[in-house]
Image: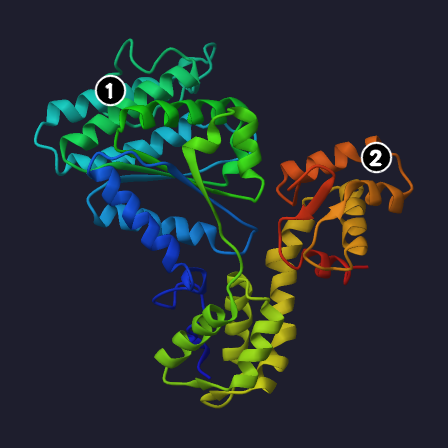
């Protein structure tokens, strides 16, 4: 069929596979927006799950929902070894601009922008030369004595309070969306928890919506013991059979084509119901099909092409980030779980490699930091990428 009109190509569908089966999460967030707008207390939200389940796409949809209701919304993607102050400043600047068009007091908006600029400028090292200092692009003088102490925990509480008050002026709220939450540095995680705790006490209209790997709850708990009271954790998993079928059938029917039940069976088997894989195999199958009714044989013919693309772009790009010692560790994990999406005991990995467990700690810790594995519970380690073990067993 026409590859130009491939409904599984990124951006082609009205609703991508990553949002199929997410009605429960979308409806729940609608309730959060309504409750917060009415001044009622509500916990912030954290989405957790493996890579490829559509957390980032869902996060983008939640942002759009907030904007449609007149909220200010900004999105941050955390990065390892990078502080939160600078990207957070840019995200909140965007959120304030969303609110400014509805606010009737420009002076009040400028007051909040001044506090934001003071917060942002503290991202510069104290000894940085003038020509090397980052400027946040906020066209007002920085405030003095508010959100500028240099202590991220104090400053973030003061900044969130100011921004939330601005949103309250126009009867809406602020949504701060934070992707790759596991990569937020420990100091910044602590500050974020403290700020959310402070705002939850006052009922201020600001919610944080985070997304990250399955061990994010443990990261937050290690930072602040009360974090479990601040966030509602929502596990985002692979699609069940009915939702996976819907993610395939809907875009095909929009193009006035059909797919046989046997082809749907095979697509679900090869994709495992993971949204990223549903899209990859669906795209390759559409390109391979020659009739308006997609058959099982089309899926089987297309599977090697989809797997080749995944091997390069999804699996290979991550595998290449690992050092030889880290690859040895990954391969041992894959061998022990026989390529399945299951955790492996760290003691068994050491036994398999005939090494002392302590000697493998640097490789394991580096892989966790790179986001390739995670520890869901003590003594267990698992891949963050679905089907990664199966991929590793195919590598020489």
Q: In this view, does 231 lie above or below 133?
A: below
Front in this rendered view, residue 298 or 260 = 260
The numbered dot on residue 136 is none
Residue 339 percent coordinates (x, y): 74, 59
Pick the quarter of the image with the C terminus: bottom right
Q: In this view, does 69 lie to the left or right of 158?
A: left
Neighbourhood count class around disc 2 (C-alpha, 10 Å): few under 14, some 14–19, many 20 upward: some
Of the numbered discs 1 and 2, the one sitting upstream in the chain is 1
Neighbourhood count class around disc 1 (C-alpha, 10 Å): few under 14, some 14–19, many 20 upward: many
Residue 239 percent coordinates (x, y): 50, 63
Q: Residue at x 54, y 56 (%)?
A: 52
Q: Which residue lies under the disc numbered 1?
A: 114
Residue 301 percent coordinates (x, y): 62, 81
Front in this rendered view, residue 227 or 273 = 227
Front in this rendered view, residue 57 or 225 = 225
Q: In which quarter of the image is residue 11?
A: bottom left
Q: In which quarter of the image is residue 389?
A: bottom right
Q: Residue at x 55, y 66 (%)?
A: 273
Q: In this view, does 324 lie to the left or right of 160?
A: right
Q: Which residue is drawn at 26% across and 16% down?
A: 142
Q: Which residue lies under the disc numbered 2?
A: 357
């Amino acid at each position: 069929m026409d590859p130009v009109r491939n409904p599984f190509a990124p951006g082609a569908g009205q609703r991508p596979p990553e949002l199929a089966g997410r009605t429960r999460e979308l409806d729940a967030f609608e309730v959060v927006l309504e409750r917060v707008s009415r001044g009622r207390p509500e916990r912030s939200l954290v989405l957790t799950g493996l890579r490829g389940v559509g957390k980032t796409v869902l996060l983008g949809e939640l942002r759009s929902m907030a904007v449609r209701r007149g909220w200010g919304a900004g999105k941050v993607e955390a990065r390892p070894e990078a502080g939160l102050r600078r990207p957070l400043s840019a995200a909140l600047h965007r959120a304030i601009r969303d609110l400014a068009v509805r606010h009737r007091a420009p002076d009040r908006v400028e007051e909040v922008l001044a506090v934001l600029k003071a917060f942002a400028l503290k991202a510069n090292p104290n000894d940085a030369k003038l020509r090397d200092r980052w400027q946040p692009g906020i066209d007002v003088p920085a405030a003095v004595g508010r959100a500028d102490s240099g202590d991220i925990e104090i400053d973030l509480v003061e900044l969130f309070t100011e921004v939330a008050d601005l949103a309250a002026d126009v009867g809406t709220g602020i949504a701060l969306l934070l992707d790759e939450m596991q990569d937020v540095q420990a100091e910044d995680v602590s500050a974020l928890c403290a700020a959310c705790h402070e705002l939850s006490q006052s009922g201020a209209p600001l919610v944080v919506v985070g997304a990250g790997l399955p061990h994010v709850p443990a990261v937050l708990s290690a930072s602040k013991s009360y974090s479990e009271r601040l966030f509602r954790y929502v596990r985002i998993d692979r699609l069940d059979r009915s939702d996976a079928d819907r993610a395939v059938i809907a875009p095909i029917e929009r193009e006035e084509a059909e797919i046989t039940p046997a082809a749907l069976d095979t697509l679900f088997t090869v994709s495992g119901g993971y949204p990223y894989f549903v899209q990859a195999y669906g795209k390759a199958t559409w390109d391979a099909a020659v009739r308006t009714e997609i058959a099982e044989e089309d899926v089987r013919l297309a599977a090697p092409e989809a797997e080749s693309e995944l091997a390069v772009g999804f699996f290979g790009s991550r595998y290449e980030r690992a050092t030889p010692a880290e690859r040895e560790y990954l391969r041992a994990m894959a061998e022990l779980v026989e390529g399945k999406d299951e955790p492996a005991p760290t003691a068994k990995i050491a036994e398999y490699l005939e090494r002392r467990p302590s000697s493998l700690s640097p490789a394991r810790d580096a892989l966790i930091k790179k986001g390739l594995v995670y520890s869901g519970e003590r003594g267990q380690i698992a891949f963050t990428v679905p089907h990664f073990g199966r991929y590793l067993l195919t590598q020489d």
